[in-house]
């Protein structure tokens, strides 16, 4: 597997006894860079949704094991399916999107955590993302939190009543793996190296907002989903006037303005996403009322 000098300098010589499961679909432009940062893991599995752009070939050439995923329209969806069918070599698994990878500092922290992982103190760990937006890594503003490091013997992705919902359907969206064990928090951040054009970000979030809007029309499903988010996600799900409150929080309270125009665009873009969900919910309610 190819790797970067920067990563090697921090990684040490011993591979980490943690499996990587990386989710991909037509990620030829991104996956090579991501895999170059994973040299510290000898077990790297790419769960590929039958990509048509050579993603699987790039992953194999980099030394990863590729497992094809063809969704049948039912549960389990992609993430839980990967835990059942990816055959990770290690009990602890780091789940990554195709544009995510650990920093050298996170690799060091993972090595320090190995005794704790073995002890079973926690069933999963959450971490903040270091987000790349408009070509720059944001230092301020809202931080996304994900539960990406999991004990696969004590963690699972639940089934949410969303098979009827439009949007991105084959993979679990906006909810976290569940565990009955305590959940730890890592101090270092996971890189989200989004190099796609902003048009891709808008298109993706248009699908996400379709999914969110339809769930909001089904209160029981929305409430069930809310319990499966991070604590931060549960808080934001309840906030009134969410677009305005979120922009104020991200851009002002969290000093997003210090990231310049990128900080403004990121805060405004996410606030607009939440506004978009509201618009779609109101439209669905009008259609529902019209149909009697």
Image (cartoon, rainbow, N blue to C red):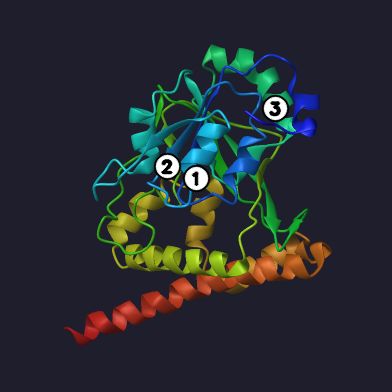
For label 3, count other residues whose C-alpha is less than 10 Å away and answer few (under 14), some (14-19) or many (20+): many
In this view of the protein, which residue sits in the foreground, 22 or 176?
22
Indicate left or right for 134 with 57 as reference. right
Cβ atoms at labels 3 and 2 below 8 Å apart: no
The disc label shown at residue 107, or none: 3
Q: Where is residue 212 in the image (x, y as percent from the top left)?
A: 40, 63
For label 1, count other residues whose C-alpha is less than 10 Å away and answer few (under 14), some (14-19) or many (20+): many
Q: Which residue is drawn at 78% across and 70% down?
A: 261
User: Where is mark 2, residue-wise?
Assistant: 48
The quadrant of the rendering that contains the N terminus is: top right
Cβ atoms at labels 1 and 3 below 8 Å apart: no
Q: Residue at x 62, y 16 (%)?
A: 114
Is the residue 248 above or below the residue 70 in the image? below
Q: Distance between the residues labelled 3 and 2?
A: 25 Å
Q: Distance between the residues labelled 2 and 1?
A: 8 Å
Front of the two marks 3 and 2: 2
Q: Which type of secondary structure does the marked residue at label 3 adopt? A: helix
Q: How far apart are marks 1 and 3 (CA)?
A: 25 Å
Front of the two marks 1 and 3: 1
User: Where is mark 1, residue-wise?
Assistant: 55
Cβ atoms at labels 2 and 1 below 8 Å apart: yes
Q: Position of residue 70 (x, y in %)?
A: 30, 44
Is the residue 226 above or below the residue 19 in the image? below
Q: Which type of secondary structure does the marked residue at label 2 adopt? A: strand
Q: Which residue is drawn at 72% across and 15% down?
A: 13
The quadrant of the rendering that contains the C terminus is: bottom left
Is the residue 33 above or below the residue 124 in the image? below
Q: Is residue 198 visible?
A: yes
In this view of the protein, which residue sits in the foreground, 23 or 112?
23
Q: Residue at x 73, y 60 (%)?
A: 135
């Amino acid at each position: 597997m190819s790797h970067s000098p920067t990563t090697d300098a921090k990684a040490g010589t011993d591979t980490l006894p943690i499996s990587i499961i990386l989710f991909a679909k037509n990620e030829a432009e991104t996956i090579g860079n991501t895999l170059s940062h994973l040299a510290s893991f000898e077990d790297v599995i790419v769960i590929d949704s039958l990509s048509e752009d050579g993603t699987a070939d790039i992953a194999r050439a980099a030394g990863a094991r590729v497992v094809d995923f063809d969704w049948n329209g039912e549960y389990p969806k992609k993430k839980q399916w990967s835990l059942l069918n990816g055959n990770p070599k290690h009990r602890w698994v780091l789940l990554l999107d195709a544009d995510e990878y650990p920093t050298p500092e996170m690799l060091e922290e993972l090595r320090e955590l190995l005794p704790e992982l073995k002890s079973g103190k926690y069933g999963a760990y959450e971490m903040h993302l270091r987000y790349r937006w408009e070509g720059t890594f944001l230092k301020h503003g809202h931080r996304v939190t994900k539960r990406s490091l999991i004990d696969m013997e004590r963690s699972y992705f639940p089934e949410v009543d969303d098979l009827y919902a439009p949007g991105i359907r084959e993979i679990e969206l906006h909810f976290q793996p569940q565990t009955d064990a305590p959940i730890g928090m890592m101090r270092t951040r996971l890189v989200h190296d989004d190099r796609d054009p902003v048009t891709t970000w808008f298109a993706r979030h248009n699908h996400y907002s379709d999914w969110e809007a339809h769930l909001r029309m089904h209160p029981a499903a929305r409430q069930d989903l809310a319990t499966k988010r991070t604590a931060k996600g549960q808080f934001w799900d309840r906030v009134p006037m969410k677009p305005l409150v979120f922009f104020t929080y991200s851009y002002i309270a969290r000093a997003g303005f210090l990231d310049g125009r990128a900080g403004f665009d990121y805060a405004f873009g996410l606030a607009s996403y939440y506004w978009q969900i509201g618009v779609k919910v109101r439209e669905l309610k009008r259609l529902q009322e019209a149909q009697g």
